[in-house]
Image: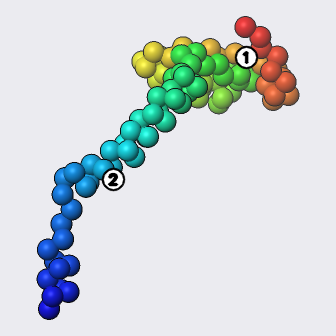
Amino acid sequence: MLFFSACIEFQPKIGDKLKTFLPALLLAMLGFAAAYPFVDPAPPDMLSFSVGSKQGQYDAHALAYQDYLKQRGITVYVLESAGSLENVEGEFKF
């Protein structure tokens, strides 16, 4: 009976909780502050699609993306190419 009542009566105090969680919280905040200078900025506000011909489906999809992303402040360039090989080689230089 004595053992059972001792287990029920134990409740950590606020000071005990602070001693446990405050150092962990401070360490996490210090980690975020140290990592902040090395984090990349937000995604770029410019995007380019290399499509085949103007009559192809890739062009239609790229134009749909262009309209959609323009509403969100992202500029999309749709570049016509000679085909897949030119797209892979990355012939387009800005």
Considering only vertical position in the picture, is 77 above or below 2? above
Considering only vertical position in the picture, is 4 above or below 22? below
Mark 2, other Cα within 10 Å: few <14 / some 14–19 / many ≥20: few
Looking at the image, which residue is at 19% across and 53% down? 14
Mark 1, other Cα within 10 Å: few <14 / some 14–19 / many ≥20: some
Q: Circle 1 sits on which residue?
A: 80
The residue under label 2 is which amino acid type? Thr
Image location (x, y in percent) of residue 2: 15, 88
Tell whether label 1 touches label 2 (CB within 8 Å): no
Of residues 43 and 75, which is closer to you in this image?
Answer: 43
The residue under label 1 is which amino acid type? Glu
Of residues 89 and 37, which is closer to you in this image?
Answer: 37
Residue 85 horizontal side relative to residue 62, left or right: right
Describe the element under mark 1 as helix, strand or loop.
Answer: strand
Q: Circle 2 sits on which residue?
A: 20
Disc 2 versus disc 1: distance between alpha carbons?
61 Å
Considering only vertical position in the picture, is 31 above or below 12? above
Q: Is residue 67 at least partly visible in the picture?
A: no
Residue 68 horizontal side relative to residue 46, left or right: left
